[in-house]
Structure formats: C-alpha cells, structure tokens
Image (spheres, coloured by chain):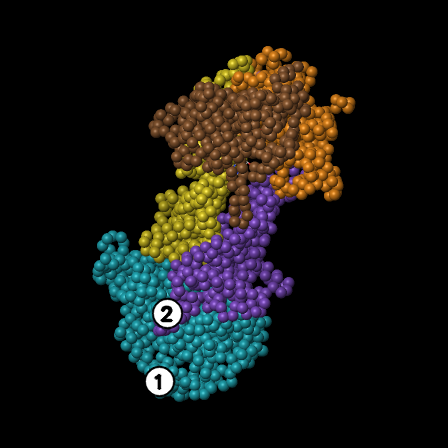
Chain colours: A cyan, B orange, C yellow, D brown, E purple
Amino acid sequence: EGHEGERGRDGEVSILYWQAPSTMNPFLSGGTKDVEAASLVVEPLARFDETGTIQPWLVDEIPTVENGGVSEDLMSITWKITPGLVWSDGTPFTSADVQFTYEYCTDPEGGCAQGAKFEPVESVETPDELTVVVNFKEPTPYPYTAFAGGESPILQKAQFENCKGAAASTCTEENFNPIGTGPFVVDEFKTNDVITLSANPNFRFEGKPAFAKVNFKGGGDAEAAGRAVMQTGEFDYAWNLQLAPEVIAQMETGGMGTTVVGFGPLVERIELNHTNPDPALGPDERSVIRPHPFLQDPAVYKALSLAIDRPLLVEIGYGQAGKVTCNLVPAPEAFNSSALECSEQDIEGAKKLLDDAGYVDSDGDGVREKDGVELRMLYQTSTNAVRQDFQQLIKEWWEEIGFAVELRNISGSVFFGGDAGSPDTIQKFYADVEMYANTFNGTDPQSYLGGPLCSKIPSPENQWQGENIPRFCMEEYDELWAELSRTAAPEERQRIAKELNDMYVSNGGQIPLVHRGRLSAHANSLGGVKLNVWDSELWNVADWYRIGE
Amino acid sequence: MPDGDTRNVLEVRGLRTVFETRRGEVHAVNSVSFEVKPGELLGVVGESGSGKSVTMMSLVGLLPSPPAEVREGKVLLDGEDLLQVTPARLRDIRGSDVGFIFQDPMTSLNPVFTVGFQIMEPVRRHMGLNKKQARARAIELLELVGIPGAAGRLSDYPHQFSGGMRQRVMIAIALACDPKVLIADEPTTALDVTIQAQILEIIEDLRSKLGMAIVWITHDLGVIAGIADRVAVMYGGQIVEHAEVFPLFNDPRHPYTRALLKTIPTVSGKRAAKLQVIEGQPPMLGAAPTACAFRDRCPLAFERCHAENPQRETVGPGHDVACFHPLAHTAKEGAA
Amino acid sequence: MTDARDPDTPVGGDMATVVASAAVAGAEPILLTRARSQWWDVWDQFRSHKGAMAGAAIFLAIVGLVVFGPLFVDLESGIKSNMRSRNLGASLAHPLGTDRLGRDMFARMIAGGRVSLAVGLTAMALSLVLGTLIGVLAGYFKRLDGPLMRFTDLFLALPLLPLLLVMVLLFREPLTAAFGVETGIFILIVAAIGVTSWMQTARIVRGDVLALKEREFVLAARSIGTPSRRIVTRHVLPNVLSPIMVSATLGIATAIITESALSFLGLGFPPDFPTWGRLLNDGVPYLELYPGRAFWPGAAISLVVLSINYVGDGLRDALDPRIRGR
Amino acid sequence: MTRPLVEVRNLKMHFPVHAGILRRQVGAVKAVDGVSFDIVEGETLGLVGESGCGKSTCGRAVLRLYDITDGEIIVDGRAIGQESQMSLRTMRPTMQMVFQDPQASLNPRMTVGAIIGEPLSEHTRMSRAERIARVGELMDQVGLNRTFVNRYPHEFSGGQRQRIGIARALALNPKFIVCDEPIAALDVSIQAQVVNLLEELQGRLGLTYLFISHDLSMVRHIADRVAVMYLGKLVELAPRDALYDTPLHPYTEALLSAVPEPDPAKAGQKRDRIVLQGDVPSPANPPDGCNFSTRCPRVMEVCSRIDPEFREVQPGHWAACHLHDSIRPSGTTRRHTEATTMVEPNKESNP
Amino acid sequence: MLTFTIRRLLFAIPTLLFIALVIFLLLELAPGDPMANVPLTVPPEIKEQMRQALGLGEPVHIRFWKWIVQFFWVEPLNVFDYLFDTNFADGRLRIISWQNRAPVFITIAERIPQTLWVVGTAYLVAIAIAIPVGIYSAYRQYSAFDQVGTFVTMIGFSVPPFFSGVLVIIIFAVQLRWFPSIYDTRLVVDSWESFGMQVRQMFLPVMVLALQITSQLSRFMRASMLDNLNQDYVRTARAKGLREKTVVLVHVLRNSMIPVVTVIALGVPAIFGGAIITEQVFKVNGIGQLLITAIQANDLPMVQTLTFIFAVLIVLFNLIADVLYGILDPRIRYD
Ligand SMILES: Nc1ncnc2c1ncn2[C@@H]1O[C@H](COP(=O)(O)OP(=O)(O)OP(=O)(O)O)[C@@H](O)[C@H]1O
Ligand SMILES: Nc1ncnc2c1ncn2[C@@H]1O[C@H](COP(=O)(O)OP(=O)(O)OP(=O)(O)O)[C@@H](O)[C@H]1O
Ligand SMILES: [Mg+2]
Ligand SMILES: [Mg+2]
Ligand code: NI
C-alpha cells in the first residue's frame, strides 16, 4: 500500500464491537471481544495472516525443524525475539516477559482462560534476553500454539508481576491498561462501554500506525453496528455482523461502507449435551453427570441431523457468508473431511431411524418416547435474529420427527461471557442442545480437535473452563488424538485430523450446520483492512489508514 | 336624569341565565329584575337552588361560560349596561365598583398567599397604589373590619385565621376599592350565630359609614329581618315577591313567602305545638318556565297556575308579587 | 298516582290552606323514572366522552379480534414456517404479509395479542387484588397502617425493572419445571408484573379508605353494630371501586408495556412464542426493509394502551361526581 | 319521677395530639371534658353550642362510637362506659343515631332497602321476606313510598334522605336516638317536615332523643330540656322555658341574643344585642379557669383562675358560672339581674 | 416543619436498612458464586482465606453488615480521600464488581455523567414543555388544543421507547442524517463545537425520553390545574377584577404547582436510575445499561449496590418531596 507518512497522520479511527469488552486482559476472558480489543495493545510472538499462514511478529522468523528452531524430537521450540523491541513504556521487551506470560497463565489460581494454549508446554526457558525456549511435555508436531495468535499474547512482566495467581483478578488497573508492544496504548478503559487508545509512541515500525487515536466502542446490537458503519457512517469498522442477508444487503445500499467476508474454520453448530442437564440435579452437578437420557443414542443424534435442511439455513441465515458443512473442521481445505454427507434433508429417514430404535409416540402426545423417557429438549442459543430463525426452523423439523423442543435464547454477552457465576454460559450448558459458532486460531486443528478430549470437560473443578462443552468422552478419540499429537508428517496429520473429525461428528459430539464466513463491515474511507479469520480481526490495525484525504 | 334620592346605583332588568348541561338547559334565572339605591340594603331570600347566587354572579360575568350563558336582560350599574361592556371593562368594574363576599370563608381565600397580598391585590390593580400605599390601605381595611393587630397579621396565611376572621378578610377585600355595590352571597351561613352577630354588626356599621348599596343573599329570614331595607324572595329562579321589609314580614302576599314565614320557629315568642310545613320539594330547574314554579306545593293552585307563569304585579306601595291570586292583605292575622 | 306522597307525614293542622297533600310528589320528576343505579349515571357520562367511547370501541374490537380471530385465521400458519411464502407483502391470503420464515403475520399478531392481552389482564387483576387488599387493610385498620405503608414504601423504593429481572432470573427454572414452559413463564411474568405494580393502587385505595372511614355512613354502620369486616366488604369496598377501576385500566396498559419491555430485554417468553412485544422486537431489525413487521405489533401495543388510557380518562371523568354533575 | 333512660357522668373524650420528633403525645383535644346529664325516658334533651364545642363528639361518645377517655354512661340500666365494642353489639339495637348530613350518612352504593335492612340483617335472624316486609313497614312509618325501595340515595331529595336515615335508626325498635344536627343540612322549608316526623315518631313509639343542634329556635321547638355546651363542657342545663326565658349563664344569654329574629320589628329592638368578641378558643388549649372567661362580657377576676362548678342553681336548672356562686343550690329563685334586662321574652311585637 | 423533617429523616434510616436487607437477601438468592472462578485444585485452606477476604463464607448477617459498612463508610471515605487527597480508606476493602474486578463505585462514577446528561436533560426539557402545556390545556379544557394535547400525551404514554427509539433513529439518523445514532460517551464538552456535538447526539434519546416524561407530567399538571380552577378562591380572584393571566398564572398556578413539584421531585431518582431501555436503544452506556449488563453477568455486588443506590435516592426524594410540599403549602408549613 502506498500509504505512508508519519505516525498518527490520519487522526482517529472508530471501531464498533456490539459486544462490549469488559477487560483488556485476554487471559482473564475467553470472549472474542476481549481478545480482539486486547490485540490492539498486546501482541503474540507470531500471528496468522489472512491466508492462515503463520507470520513472525515479535520474532524475526518462524522457528521450524528446517531452520533448527524446532528440535528434531519435536520436544522444544526456540523463539528468537527481534532485537531492540520495546514495550510502549519504553522498557525493553525480553524473554523474561515471555516466560512470565507462561507462568502467569499456568498459575493454578489465576483461572487463565487460554490455558489450552499452554497445555502441552512443560517449561519455558530463557537462555538469554532474546531467546525463548519452549519445552513440551511430549513431542509436539505443531508447536505454534503458545505465544502464537491473538489468544496468547505476551504480558509485561514488570507490570503483571504482582498480579499472578489469585491476585490476577484484583489488578484492575493492570487488567484495564496493559502495557503492550502493539500499535496502540490504552488511554482510558471504561468497562463494557468504550476504550480510548492512542498510537504507541514506541511502536517498532516507523510511520505506523496511521491513526493517532482509536475509539473502540462496545455495546448494542449487530444491527445498530452495521447501520452505524454502512448507513450513517458514524463508525469505521463494525465487527461480526451476524444479520439476515437481506438486512445486510439493505444496509449496504446506504453507501457508506462495505462488507468483507472471510471463511475460517468457523462453524455454526448444535452441540449435543452428553450429560444430564435436568435442573433437579442441582446447579453444579447437572452438567457433569453422565449420560444424557437419550442424546447419546446414535439413532437420536443421527435423526436430529438428518431432519435439518442445511442449504435452507444457509440461504436464510447467511447468504454469501455461509456454506453447508458436515464437519467440525471445514478449513483449511486440507483438513476438510469429505466422508460425511448431510446436505440433504431426510425427514422420513430420520423418523425411520427413530422408529427402528424403538422411539415411538406411544401416548399420542406427538412426542416420541422410549422406556418412559420422552424426547424433550431444551434448545438454547444466544439472542440473535439469525439464530432465532434457525432455532425456529430446526425446532419445527425436530418436532416433525417427534421431538418436543423448548427454545431459549440468552443475551450474547452472558452466553459467551464465560462468567463462572452465570448459569447461562455455553460452558455450563444447562440445556440439552445449544447452538453457537466456534473456530480456532491458526491453521492447525490439533488443539481444536483436542477440545473433545475427556480431560477438557468444563466442570466446577476447573471453574468451567475447558473446550469440551458437549462433555463428549470417548477413549478411541482420546487415543487417536494422542496419535495426532505425536505425528509430524503433514499428510498423516491431515488424515488423522479428518478421522478425528469424522469420529467426533458421527458419534454425536455435535451437529455441524453452517460453515460461516466472518462478515464485518468497514467504512469506504478506511483502507488497509484485511479480514483475517485466523487471528484477531484487528491483527493488522497498524496498517489501517484513511483513504482520500 | 333621576335625582339623588331615587337614582338606582344598580338596576337589573329581565335577567335570564341558562346553563347548558348534558341533560339539557337549566334555566337558573328567569326574568329577574330588581334595583338598589345607594346606601340601601336589599335582602334576597330563597331556598337552596332558587338561583340567588347565579343571579348575582351573572351580573358581573363571574359564571363559567360554558355552561352558563346570560341570555337576556340588562344590568345597569350607574347607567352602564354590564352585559354589553368588554371583558376588560368588566374586570375593571369587578372589585372596584362591585365588591363580592362569598359564602364559605374557608375556601374563598387562596390558601397559599398571605392575607395581606390578597387584600392588596385589588387595591393595586384598581387604585393604582404602590406597594407601600397598598399596604397602608390593607391595614386600614383590616382595622375597618375589626381585626386586632392588623399590621402584624398581613403576613399571615388564611389558615391561621378563624372562620369569622376570614370572613372579615373577605369583607375587607370586597370593600378594598370603596365599591358602589357590595354583593354578599350568604356571608354568614357558614358561621356560628355568635360570629354571625359580629359580622352583621360590622356590616351595619360599614354601611352607615361608607354608604354603599348592598345586596345581601341569605336563606335565613331572621338575618334579613334584622338588616334589610327591602327584600326580594326568590323561588325557582324567579323573584316571587318583593317588598319593603316590614310589609313583607307582616303582610306577605305570596303563598310561598307566607308559608316560609310560618315554618320557622323562633327563640322568643309563642311556641307552636307543631311546626307548619310546606309539603313537597323545591322545584328542579329545567326548561324555561311555562307555569308557576310554586304550583306543585301551592295549596291555592288552580289551572292557570299550571298553564302560565305569573308575572310580578304591584299589590301595594313598593310591593309586588308574582302570583295569580295574591293573598289578602290580612292574610297573616287570619292564619294565626 | 302510584307514588302518591307519604301517607303518614303529619299535615299541619291549621295550615290546611297552605299545605297541599296530593300534588306534591309530582314535583320530583326524577323519582318517577325507572330505578337506576349510579352506574347508569356513570355510563351516561362515560358515553359523552368521545375519546373514551372511541377507546372502548377500539379496545373491544381488538379484544374481539384476538379472541375470535382463530375462527377465521389458522393460528398454526403464524407458528409454522412456510418456506414457499417468505417475506410476502400484504395480500388476501396474508393480510399483513408474512415474515422471513413465511409465517403469516396476521396470525402471529392474533396469537401474540392473545398472550399480551392475557398477560395484561391477569397481571392487572393480580396487582389490583394485592393493591386493594393492602390499601383497604392499611386504610381501615389503624394498627396495620404503619407497617403496611412501610411495606408499600419498600416496594416503591425497590427499583422495579431490576427487581423484575431478578425475579425472572430466580424463578424461571423452578416455575418452568413445575408448570411447563408456557404456563410457567406466563405465571412468572404475570406474577412479576403484578407483584411490582400494586403499590400505586394500594396508596390510592388507602387514601380513599381513610377518607371513606370518616364518612358518616361508615359511622352509621358502626352505630348499627356492623362488625369491621362487614363494614369493609359492604361499605368500604364498593365505594373504592371507582379508583380501582381507573387503576385497572392503567394497569392493563402498563402490564402490556412491561411485558413487551421484558421481551425486548430477552427475559420474557421464549423466542418462538409470539407476543406483541416479541414480534416488535423481532421486527425492529427489518424496520427499513419490511416496516410492517415492526409497525403492526408496535401499533397494536400502542393502540391498545392508547385506547385503554382513553377509557381510563373517560372513566375518571365519569366516576368523578363533580364532573358527572347532578 | 321517671327513671332516667340515659345517665352520663363526667364523660370525657380527649383526642390525643402527637407532636415532636418521636410523635409523643403532647396534649389532647379535650373535645368533651367532664359532661354529666340525664335523659329521662320519653323526653328530648336538646344540646346546643357553637361549632366545634364538642356536641357531636358528646353524642357519639354516649353511643360508645368512640372509646371514651373517662366517665360513666348508663343506658337503659346498663353501664356501657367501659365495655368493649364487641360486647356492645348486643346493646346497639337499643340506641341509634341519626346523622347530620343525609347525603353522607347513606352509602351511595346501597339501595334504600339495603340501607334500612342492614341493621335487621346484623341483629335479627329474619328471613329475606320478613326483612322486606319490615323495611316496607319502616318506610311507611317515615313517610317514604314503599316503591322506592330499590332506589339509590342520590335519587332522593335531602328531606327524603333524612327519612331514610331515620328509618334505619328505627329499624331495631331503639329506645334512645341521638340526633346529630339532623336538620342542619336541610332547607328551611324541609326542616319542618323532618322535625315534625321526629316529634310524631317520639309520640308514637315513646322514643327518647338527644337532639344536637346549633339552631336554637329549632331546639326550643323540639326539646323538653336544653343543655348548652361550650368548649367541651356543659355551661347550662335547664328545662326549655326556663332556659330561653331566664338564662343563667352569660354565654347562653349571648347565644340567645345572637339569634336573628325573623321579625323586623323585634330585630330592630335587638340592635343592642350582646355581641361576643373573639372566637371560641381551641379545645386543645382551653383557657385557665372558666372556659368562657376569654369572651365573657361579665368576666370577673375569679373566672380566669377557678373553673366554676356545674351546679344546680335552681331546681332542675344547672349552670356553671361564678356569677351564681352566692346562690345555694336550692335557694330562692333569684334571677340573674342582667338576664332579665337584656332579654325581653314574650313581648308581642306585631305592629 | 423542622421536626417533621427530622422525624422523617430518622424514620428513613430503619427503612433504608430494611430495604438494604431485602435487596441483599433477594439478590443473595440468585445463583452465582464468585469463588467459582477459583480452580478446585487450590487447597481448601487457601480458598477459605480468599473467601474470608471477600467476606464470603461467613454467615449472611456478617456479610450484610460488611456490605453496609463498605457502602456507608468505606466508600464515602474513598470519596473523601479523592476529594481531599487523604488516605483514610487505605487498605479497606471496597465493594468489588465480580464482572471486571474493579470497585463498583468507580464504574458507577464513570457512568453517571452520561446518564445525567441525557436523562437529566430529558427531564428538564419535559418539565419545560409539560408545565405550560398542562396549564393551557386545563385552562381551555376540551378545546382543540386540549384534545390534541391529550392525544399526543396519550401517544407518549402508549408508545414504548424501544419502538419509538428505533423509529426516530431510522428517520432522523439513517434517513435524514441529522443526528448520530450512537451516543459517544467520550465526548468532553469544552468548546462550542463539542457542545453542539453533544446537543446533537443527545437530541434523539432526549426526545424519546422527554416525550414520555412530558406526557405524564402534563397530564398531572392538567389534572392539578383543573382541580384548582374549580376552587372558590378562583372566583374570589375573578371577583376582585384581576386579569385572567393573573388569576391563572398567579393564583391557580401556585396552588397547582404544589402537587406537581412533589411529583417532579419524586421523579428525580429515575434520572439517576437511568432509562434502561432508552439507554439500550441509543447506546448511551449509562447507569441503566450498567445495571442490565450487571444483571446479565450475575455481578451481584454491582447489582446490589446500584439497586440500593436507587432505593436510597427514592427514599431521599420521597422525603424531599414531602418537605417541598410543606414548604410550598403554608397550611402544612405551619403545622
Ligand atoms: N354550573 C352549573 N351547571 C348547571 N346548573 C347549575 C350550575 N350552577 C348552578 N346551577 C343551577 O342553578 C340553580 C341555581 O343555583 P344557585 O347556586 O344560584 O342557587 P342558590 O339560590 O344560590 O342556592 P344556595 O342557597 O344553595 O347557594 C340550581 O338549580 C343549580 O342546580
Ligand atoms: N377524631 C378526632 N380527632 C381529633 N380531634 C377531634 C376528632 N373529632 C373531633 N375533634 C375535635 O373535637 C372538637 C369537637 O368536635 P365536634 O365535632 O364534637 O364539634 P361539634 O360541636 O359537633 O361541631 P359542629 O357543630 O361543627 O358539628 C373539635 O375541636 C374537633 O376538632
Ligand atoms: Mg348560593
Ligand atoms: Mg357536629
Ligand atoms: Ni300559584
């Protein structure tokens, strides 16, 4: 881009996230909103670009086996920090900070939301100021999890030293105003409202960022956000406009902004609860007691999946920004399994499955039952127009094949908020099925596929942090995943990953619905936006600039 | 034209006031005529609802309109027809040339303004006095109506006064601009007899001092007998009898007047074994009268009474009666 | 001559000349009319209030439509999606068009209206019962006055929307478990609205009861020896009916708006359960594309509230003896 | 002599006044402060006085509509002064009340039949039909057309409403009725109708009345004996003629002289009537000594110190005034000198 | 009057304590535990210590007492420290939000300005419109003005803000582009230009809110005026020959304002409480929005504190309304 000049030349850029960030410390919150807001300030050692390729960020090159950065036995990786890097407060960025970040997140009392990233890590060593050696517990063929991608940025040791462990949550000042290496520094953080940032004077690139200020507003709804960018031009960037296609089209006629779409591994799916969510079981037990009364019966989950008309869902819900998928990992293409087929709705087939399995409506109330267990389900998702339409349609289809479905929608900020105190989070999963979208950072699904491991089940013991939200637990899967984690050869990895994908889906871990693109909007006058679905959307905010001035 | 003695300061001719209500018109005042001379006190008696208040309020446009409408008549105040003048002129007359005292001293004063303010208001409005002069005048007025410590009480609020005192304040307000005519609408009805006696005394006193004409409305014949020069008896929105006070009490010519006088017991004099009664109820005022209003209670009623509304006719000097068969001159003695 | 005057009233002996005996009662034309209760007067006055009559007519029309609508419209068509007829405009088959899932908007409006109105009416009834009970007890029994009024103050001081939200949060699950989803949430919402909106009624009723208690007819009842509870039911309650009726009208309106506000905040009925508030909420994103989707439920809420407010206005006038006149 | 039906001894009714930060009782409105009188069966005792002097309170206290502060009340041989409201219920049929405002004392939402029938349904076990019959009977008795039984009070005129009130009071065949200004709200021409009705009923049913009024002329007409009240206390109690002809208390005198005469001739002579100055003091804060001492035209030094005793100055004629201190209770009928000069009773003044 | 005020003030204390207790208990019943964030791998002893630090794990009455102390003593001390640069409050535990682990009063203080700006202005605008409208429509009862006024105010009552709010956004922000659709809470008014900006961004929410408040107030004003216009003293004033303007604007208005002023005072807590839905619609992230997010996130300390602050304000303004009534009405003043 031929846009150059001195730092801060383009004044202010306004970003609108309709989910408001409540902290700037991504380790204390699992929410995308918080991670992405934080990505303006704190950075990882390496990022993924818009094509999903890993890029050196605070290092000079990506360590590989070839260049010797990754040990032959796949037991360690050595990051060489770019010399001369400084934090926004002017102090040098050293390997100690990296090591500290590892300690910070792995402190058992800290409740780190990104613990999965550091799961395989045995230790982090700092032979010198600029060298970081990450040692793994076992051979790790894909070593770019810790310190790579927006979800595991580096915190400044000096700032957070006293905020480790139990103290993590009391460091208000630090959590709201972390010192980073990123293009911007926080001027003012107002919880759940607005963040004001200004250009980092010590940013490592000359002439970047182009904007002197960032106005990061949170709150509201996707529709208002889209309107503010595309129709009224009040904001420059609106994140994740999950709106009906016709609404988006209508907003674009406003002429102030354009939408951008990118397909990452984001899948809108229905998770099937493998534990018993009966409220009678008491708040904390109900999502750990296994099994679910009927959802683990293959006939049931297969029928549920068969009854869904995915192309129709894509059409009414996402239009351009969606594709039918039957997979947990639909991208990158090399990992996209083709073993499963699900684009045809087959109501009759579904009914037959249930009939054959002995689920029949014996008492004539329209709901099938077997052994006295009625096929009644609570189906929850976040409050969002498209999801409510999906709920409605899917509920009808399911009711057609003999289920009784109760719908429930929960405000997104609660549902995804990850607040351990709330009963309505995705992790708690106090419902039979729930619908949301999930994805992974980076291009390697290993850690993502590690989600369904038995050990990742969220429960009171791990304060509800853990990716295995459906409480899927299968020995074969765990074993296969272990194999994946030992395999380094790319083709072999792809094969195993696909196999894992198929195993998970066909064993009723979830019902994938739509492979979703991320649709965001930016003002026509905002240049340099590269929608990145593999990392934080704001990954290249340092390159953003104002067009035509 | 008329000479000093016979000049009427207020002359009402054929006043007709109608209320337009949802249930049709209410003819509250029907062809009422009367007059007052300076220094004279005209008593108006009648039962509740006979139209006394409405008559008086019609004179200076105090009735809310709608629903009230003064249909016809003349109200001549010193020759000026008040029904023809502009509203602004009418406001100039109210409170300066015509003073009003109302029945209920408890509610007739504005509770949130001091008594001084309320007395000074008309003074400043009509006499153009400045604040200081108005204050002096207010003190003078309060002293006039016999409120002790007048200067100190100017800054008091009405609720700090007793009923009798409030009525005195009302009188002071009415007298503020030396009105030519003072209209007192049952000023003592709400008061106790001992307080009533005080008020009556003050009025008597002021009348001789200030010499204004007074129209005194009441339903207490005793009060009328004590202070009035002439009396008009109202019934069903009309004046049915009108005479000097002595002839009226001693020689009532309308059956209603006479019956009324008989029904009231006295504290002195002979005590009847049984009170005499006028049977029935006062009439409801409805459409314009086409018959004698008293016909249904009148023992002497005959066909004509039901067909035609009698007009006032003179039966003696200054004595007129609206009845087709006025009682004989000696009626009272005969009945006894 | 049926109502010839009182035979027993003594007639002044020597006044035979003055006193008539037969013609008197005729002077009381009102007594000749058919027996009318006071409510007839109220109705008369009410009828003359054009706004109130229009309001009552509109309200009844809406209620009628909502109650009898299912006879003409298949409510299923508002609940089941129909992919062949999505986003249709108004037509004979779909008077208000269809929504994005092809559901008939008219049917949805009727289904929504049933719930919204039912919520409005029941919540109003609940709040009236509570308000009246507390108001009467506080007003009539001096000893209860202090505690009950403090209690009322307490409820007044509790901010309502948060309280409502907390109630919904707390009791949603147990109620849903006990009564099933729809009934459970219906009970919850009605109770939540009712329990948070009785205070005004209680205050008004208490004030009226306090005044009423000093009225002579209550004293008269006591002089007869009527016990307190019958004084309350026989003399006090019927006489506080008018403020209660006015409260009632306003209560329906508030309840309907509160329900829609709850739906708006995502705390009301389940998303697939149409109520006007929910429909409005769903329609708002499409306000520019398909204005009707937000407009009709919005208009329905507003119209009902508006008409009820007018009815309340008229009732207030009609029940005010000063205005009603004599 | 007939036995008194009602005996009231030293009746006190104080309404507490609360003030201050803690709402302590700081005083009391002494609405009735030590009143004693008897009412003989079949007689009418008139109770007169200015507004606020405690007449209504006295009447209600006698019927025990209030829980009295002190004193003794015996009605029909039963001491009811301290009985509880519950146990008084059985006593209610004996004593009834007619109220001042015929509009306010009738429940506007009840029909005439229900109003008159209420005492019946409270105290008798009559069947519906019996009750209707009795209501009809009562309506006849007070001169109301039976066909009005289903109408509401607002459809009646003031006089008729008062008849309804009377019928209700009569329903249980009471012996004693307190009439609290039953005619004050009525028009002159109607007052006589009601008074005549009351008198007639008394004659027919042998009722005993406590007739409260501020209309001295009406009391003179109806009462056998008259009590004058001032600021919560009786100042004078005497047989009617004695009281009107020769009032012993200066207050009674002033009261009588203040009543306007509906006769211009007499009125003319009354120009020299006694006009009391000032207002009635507040019953919450009565003056020391004699209550009347602040307004009394013949106040003496002793009056502001010592409260005069209510004594029988002449046989059957009680008064509370220091002017009569010298007179022994059963002394000669020495009249009050001024009283005779001020009022000239029985003078015919027809021209 | 003074004793009355003191008496009411004294009475307010137990009332408030009781309200505090009710709020506390009510919210305690709600599910949620701050310790859920601490992994179970933490030894029970340490966990217990942490509970102690937060005051949890102790019996409810102790926690209630601690909360009261924090609310009435520690937080005021902090304010004092802030104002006078002292450090009395050092080391004392403040009320901490579970949501973002910051003292709740800091967040509340952050939110109050925008709420005051928007809701307060709406209130003032509403008062300024409602009073004359109420006066005039009462004076000309059943006139065209009154009828139209009644209709408009009824509409104001009837249209819920989440409908009217979105409607005006579409019309004025999207179609006409006159006003912004999203409120900028960062705007600092320090120049005419920024003041203009502020006015522009406040216009729509203020309009929506003011319509509602105006409706209620003008109805109230009208009723109060009507009550007084029928009073005897109005006739007296007219009989004095006063101009209509004086009669209405001096005599009647002064009396009518007594109840209206108290109603206005009673509405003031609502200003601080924010208008939850309007704030939501216009993205004015004020107190109302804070409360909603806190409720949604189960942030008990925040909800308890906010709710109790409202209760305090309501009780306080009830008191102020009573006192105002006394001051305005001499009949009560001299009682
Ligand atoms: N605003 C009104 N609307 C309809 N009718 C009215 C109105 N004001 C008065 N009237 C009627 O006018 C008639 C006369 O009333 P007015 O007040 O003059 O009686 P009054 O003789 O003064 O009685 P009172 O002694 O009770 O004061 C009454 O029948 C009354 O019903
Ligand atoms: N419930 C009460 N509480 C306090 N004071 C009262 C109460 N009832 C009456 N009083 C006071 O007692 C005094 C006597 O009142 P009461 O009604 O008996 O007077 P009254 O002689 O009947 O007057 P009126 O002629 O006006 O009816 C008055 O000063 C009144 O204010
Ligand atoms: Mg009158
Ligand atoms: Mg009385
Ligand atoms: Ni005749």
Look at the picture and state if A154 lies above or below A246.
Answer: below
Q: Position of residue B160 (x, y in %)?
A: 62, 40
Mark 2 close to ligand 2, CB under 8 Å: no
Decide: few, some or many residues near mark 1? Use Cα within 10 Å; few <14, some 14-19, many ≥20: many
Which residue lies at the image location 35% right of the left edge and 26% below the top edge? Answer: D129
Quarter residue B32 falls in? top right
Look at the picture and state if E330 lies above or below A408.
Answer: above
Q: Chain under label 2?
A: A
Tell me, yes or no, if residue B235 can be seen here: no
Side of A357 where D204 appears, left or right: right
Decide: few, some or many residues near mark 2? Use Cα within 10 Å; few <14, some 14-19, many ≥20: many
Which residue lies at the image location 48% right of the left edge and 28% below the top edge? Answer: D178
Look at the picture and state if A413 lies above or below D79.
Answer: below
Quarter residue B95 falls in? top right
Q: Nearer the viewer, residue C103 or A80?
A: A80
Q: Nearer the viewer, residue D317 or D187?
A: D317
Q: Nearer the viewer, residue C294 or B7?
A: B7
Identify the image quadrant of the N terminus of chain C. top left
Q: Position of residue E81 (x, y in %)?
A: 56, 67
Amino acid beneath label 2: Gln
Q: Chain under label 1?
A: A
Q: Position of residue A453 (x, y in %)?
A: 31, 73
The residue wearing badge 1 is A74
The Cα atoms of the two marked residues, 2 and 1, are separated by: 32 Å
The residue wearing badge 2 is A463
Q: Earlier in the sequence, mark 2 or mark 1?
A: 1
